[in-house]
Image (spheres, rainbow, N blue to C red):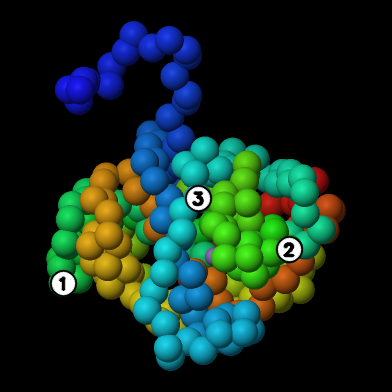
Amino acid sequence: MSNQPNTGPFVIEPPAQASLPVQGSAMRFPVHRIYCVGRNYAAHAVEMGYDPDKEPPFFFQKNPDNLLTGTEDFPYPPATRDLHHEVELVVALSKGGRDIAAEAALDCVYGYAVALDMTRRDLQGEAKKLGRPWEVGKAFEHSAPSGPLVPASEIGHPARGAIWLDVNGERRQAGDLEQMIWKTQEMIAILSGLFELRAGDLIMTGTPAGVGPVERGDVLRGGVEGVGEITFRVV
Ligand code: MN
């Protein structure tokens, strides 16, 4: 079967293109895939019961249409009693490829954002225990509330700086980007050996220690120094 151009006509209405707003612009960044890195801050690996020195990086994905933007209301998802916050730096790629060298990897970066990797921890825990995939814990609707992308042309490539999350004004997560075990350029290099990366791909780079449950009514405020802040209320 030939690889036909993906231009339709389509038998159903095509799904909307997932995208992120770009700070200071009326234009949006179209999203292709969302790669997520697990346990990329040593203190978080330890709090989840793992030894950070013994692990190569591992990845899972969220779906592009799991992004939540343009609202401050985060809807509490179904089928969980243990919904956790994970504040993360997001890397957005403006070009991709295979086997990208770490030294060239930052040339692929369009910009950065602050987002939450919301996690149904009870479902994820069950999946881990049974050796099942993580999608039910990680890749549900609205599971990636995100702020706008800030172009690297404006802020450079943040390698250090505070990353934090407050719940109802109380600090819950605190770390520094320099504590990332696998750096942005290393994650791009490693991912590009596993997948063909493309313009439009996002990488969620892992969360610092302090993850925990949220309830309806909680206000989550997260930030990354030099990138920005986001606020979401659990409804
Ligand atoms: Mn995460």
Quick one: label 1 or label 2, which is nearer the N terminus? 1
Q: In which quarter of the image is residue 187?
A: bottom left
In the image, ligand 1 is in what quadrant?
bottom right
Nearer to the camera, 31 or 192? 192
- Give the label, 1 or 2, closer to the camera: 2
Q: What element carries label 1?
A: helix
According to the picture, the residue beneath numbered tag 2 turns out to be 122
Could you classify mark 1 by the number of other residues whose Cα lies within 10 Å: few (under 14), some (14-19), or many (20 or more)?
Answer: few
- Name the spot of residue 158 as percent of width and height, x first: 36, 70
Q: What element carries label 2?
A: helix
User: Residue at coordinates 28% horizontally, 16% vertically from top-left?
Assistant: 7
Quick one: label 1 or label 3, which is nearer the N terminus? 3
User: Residue at coordinates 77% horizontally, 49% vertically from top-left?
Assistant: 79
Q: What element carries label 3?
A: strand
Nearer to the camera, 120 or 86? 120
Nearer to the camera, 25 or 170? 170
